[in-house]
Amino acid sequence: MYSSHRSWTQLTLFLLAWFCLRPLAPGDLALVHAGPTPAAPSASTYTSDSTELAFSILPDDGPRLEGQSQGMDALALQEGMNAYGKGEWSQARRLFEKVVSQQPESALTPTAMTFLAETALKENTSNGNRLEALDRYKTLLRDYPQSLNAKRAEWRMADVYLSQGWHQEAQSLYERALSHNAQTPDGERALLGIGYTALALGKWRDAELTFEDLRKRSSHDHILLHATVGLASSFFRQRRAQDASAMYDLAYRRWPKSMRMNPLALGRYASIQLDLHHEVIGRGLLLQFYNLYPAHQDASVLLLRLADSLQSSKYLPSAELFYGFIAAHYADSPQAALAAVRLATLRMEQKVEAGGRPVVRTPAGLMYDHPSPDQSVDDYLKQMQAIAAQHDHDMIGSEALYEVAARLEQSEEIAPALIAYKLVADRNSAGPDDPWPAKAGDRLATILRPWMEAAVRSHDDLTLTTLFHRHGPAAERHYLASPLLLEIAEAHDRLGFTTEAGRLYQLMAKGTKRPLVTEQALIGLAKVYLSQRDTAAARKVLERYRLEYPIGRSEQEALHLLVQTMAEEGDLAGLLHFCRAWMLHHPKHPERPWMYQQMATVFLRLNKHEEAVIATEEAFKAGAPKTIVALLAYADLLAQMKRYQEAIDVYHTVVEKKPDQAQLQWARLQIVRGWQALKQHDRATVALAELGQTDDALVTRFSSSIHESIKQERQLPQEGL
């Protein structure tokens, strides 16, 4: 696959080496930092936990030679070791079994048993052979517990368990080996296994602490190498890029050959350098990776990162070359489609920047002419739409469709651009790792926000809500800490979409750290709950507001709403207790008159008329406005308590305030009834005359009835004579 292009690849790498590497000394690289660049998507060097050890083989010097013998067992062991070294597993097995079976008391038997276990592992990786190896090691531990190979067997068995994903068993054996050999190299090797077991279990912090401890206590070079790489892996998994970079850099400088032979570590090191915007050294490491592992499963991913880095650093011809190379040589990989998208986009940008001038043909353009450098905008859009349709359920399709929207926006075709952005924002089939829906939502917010602000200024609720819902899903995330989202929620409420308004208010109440926005969101949410007759929820929201913002800007409104909520809830005893407690703690608050009036209303609902009158009078004394409505309510209450003279005086006050026709007729009618109740017939007659004729049939009927009643009451004494 690669042989026909080997010479071209080598020439390419040679031409690019001058900006990727700067040699200081043989084997060293200069940390030449390029300017900042957007981080490219992470490569697949974020390998799954189950393959952590596949690329990081733990150090093992193999079976240990112990004991001395001059007999046939020594000869058989030596011949077996020779066959083992040549990979002649059947011959090696026969010779080692000869030592174990024929010379069980030989000092060489532990060594032969160890070689038998390792032969089983190397001969065949089937489960049966692994079980055979484990059985051999268990026999060795039982029969020869003091042998050197028994000490190795403890952590070697754990290695076998770990390689098969049996993490708990591996950890148990590693800990056992560590407890038996705490201050020896075997203990250090067991501790190294514990660290890698923690990595396999996803316990990154435990792995970090284990590797740090091992680096402090060990002086063994191989142990230090694997502990350093393991520590770097734990930092990498915790997304601590600076710490991981320091460890990988240390390992690369101290053990360059070992690092180059570890594709997992080398790929991660390169990715971290790019993530930290160390573009030059990152590109150099990526080139090394490709030179060493051109057929590796991550080669296309890392080459794509290299091309992205070159593009962000404005090395456009080189980026074009690598994009074309990936598309041509890794045609069956997802990265080929991505490279095609980015190559076409790069060439289109170059064509737009060139204006009417012809685009200079680069070496990449000559070698990889698909898409053509002379591709028209319409052809480019069709190509991107075709790729988006082909990759409808992955990030490649999202990126292609986003580029379509971006090109339409740059061409000032705003309406189709908005539609395309909306299509990207609505995509969710690629999962949470797809960055393009969020980017499309950001672009939509950038375009639509000025229009929404204009709709707010013109009080156009319908346009405001329509524009808001053109953002796609999770539109509110763009405005979560903005007062604009309050306007959007209020517009939904005014249009009758109370459920959506409540959802937006809830998001603002939970997701913003701006107190003013949170205050208004809580008030709005309480109003929505009240409109939905959910008084319990409204009460909780208002109580939260009063707890968090006791002197907030909406304190008065929150107080009024809380009293209204408790009244609608029917908790009159609780409301009365709240009013009294509030009055006790706010002796000079400007809302005291209003609170007295609320207490009067509660007393009236509880049929405690005397207390209601007292509360009303206290309200007036405290400065409550003597409005016509308040005076009428007060007078009606006095009349109910048969305090007619006081009621008549208050009704006269109402008449003097020039109320509307209905209020005036009611006040005069109640004055008549008051004088009648006091047996003041003359005054009742005068008051009835003042009531006069009215267009209200009900009042006319009442006045006629009262007139007849007064006439009858006047005749009663005469009839008695």
Image (cartoon, grey):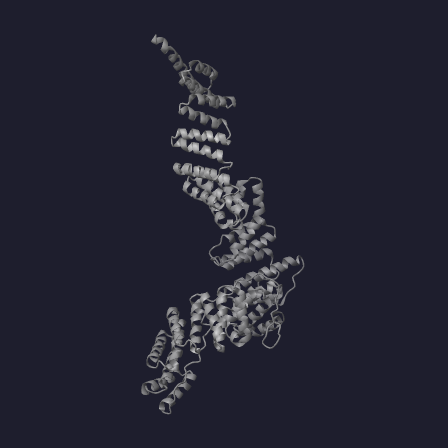
Where residue 58 appears, x then y in whole percent? 45, 75
88 left or right, relative to 370: left
Q: Please state the total of marks drawn on the protein image.
A: 0
Which quadrant of the figure contains the C terminus? Answer: top left
Q: Which residue is nearer to you in this view: 349 or 480?
A: 480
Going 55% across and 40% down the picture, which residue do you hit?
A: 460
Going 42% across and 71% down the picture, which residue do you hit?
A: 194
* Figure quadrant of residue 637: top left
Where residue 491 appears, x then y in whole percent? 51, 41
Q: Which residue is nearer to you in this view: 181 or 372?
A: 181
Q: Is residue 699 above or below residue 107?
A: above
Where residue 217 appears, x then y in whole percent? 47, 74
Q: Is residue 140 above or below residue 676?
A: below
* Figure quadrant of residue 612: top left
292 left or right, relative to 701: right
Q: Which residue is nearer to you in this view: 441 or 644?
A: 644
Single out the residue that lies furthest toward the bottom.
Answer: 70
Q: Which residue is nearer to you in this view: 73 or 420?
A: 73
Q: Is residue 604 above or below residue 194?
A: above
State whether residue 297 appears in this view. no
State whether residue 380 appears in this view. yes
